[in-house]
Amino acid sequence: MRFKIGEKVGFLREVGGGIVQSYKNDQIVIVEDETGFEREFMEEDLNSIIGDQSNILSSNFDINDVIEETVSYSDDLGDITKNKDFWEIDLHTHVLMESERGLSNGQLLSHQLLEFKRFFRKAREKSIRKLVVIHGVGEGVLKSEIRQFLEGKEGIDFYDADFRKYGKGATTVELFYR
């Protein structure tokens, strides 16, 4: 039993989260979702939410609101290549972190998403017109989360990055400004 009753959790295979209500058995957790319904999840399909991250998907998201409650970041934005034509970031965990030891898949995903959102925000502040986000192929969870985040934004177009250079593991984001 990894989670405590009353603990906030996020769903790894879908958007959203909830609060742990009980355990059905050693592997199945009963979670009350945001709509008040109790749902069953495999324990490995959930991750802990540290602090209040309720604003993480809103349009006025500010990374500074959650940094102190989650992980400490250096001023560096990870492995970012700043080209005069575009910015590129590699979100592979072995690039972003010194060690992945002791972290669940959900915690790793949360870290990757925070880095991406921080990178995206910085690019917007600097009026960068094109981003390349290297997310890897894997099971497609990170790619899906990134694209879901981008879908709600105005003045943005995104698509698969150049296959010859990145294979299937990257997304190009074009930002349009007035």
Image: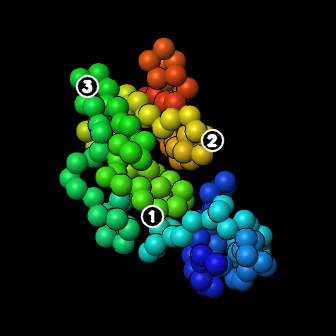
The residue indicated by pointer 1 is: 102
Say whether disc 2 or disc 1 marks the residue closer to the N-terminus: 1
Quarter of the figure that contains the N terminus: bottom right
Residue 119 visible in this rendered orientation of the protein: no
Say which residue appears at 60% left-offset and 45% top-offset.
141
SS class of the residue under badge 1? Answer: loop
Neighbours of disc 2 within 10 Å: few (<14), some (14-19), many (20+)? few
Picture layout, residue 23 above or below residue 172: below
Q: Residue furthest top?
A: 164
Q: Amino acid at mark 3?
A: Asn
Quarter of the figure that contains the C terminus: top left
* Distance in Å between CA atoms under marks 2 and 1: 21 Å
Say which residue appears at 37% left-offset and 28% top-offset.
130
Q: Between tags 1 and 3, which lies in front?
A: 1
SS class of the residue under badge 3? Answer: loop
Disc sitting over residue 83 in the figure: 3
The residue indicated by pointer 2 is: 139
Q: Residue furthest front?
A: 101
Residue 153 visible in this rendered orientation of the protein: yes
Q: Amino acid at mark 2?
A: Glu
Q: Are marks 2 and 1 in contact (CB under 8 Å)?
A: no
Q: Residue furthest left?
A: 75
Say whether disc 1 or disc 3 marks the residue closer to the N-terminus: 3
On screen, residue 84 versus residue 67, left or right, reads: left
Q: Amino acid at mark 1?
A: Gly
Query: Which is more toward the observer, 3 or 88?
Result: 3
SS class of the residue under badge 2? Answer: loop
On screen, residue 21 versus residue 58, left or right, reads: right
On screen, residue 115 versus residue 158, left or right, reads: left
Neighbours of disc 1 within 10 Å: few (<14), some (14-19), many (20+)? few
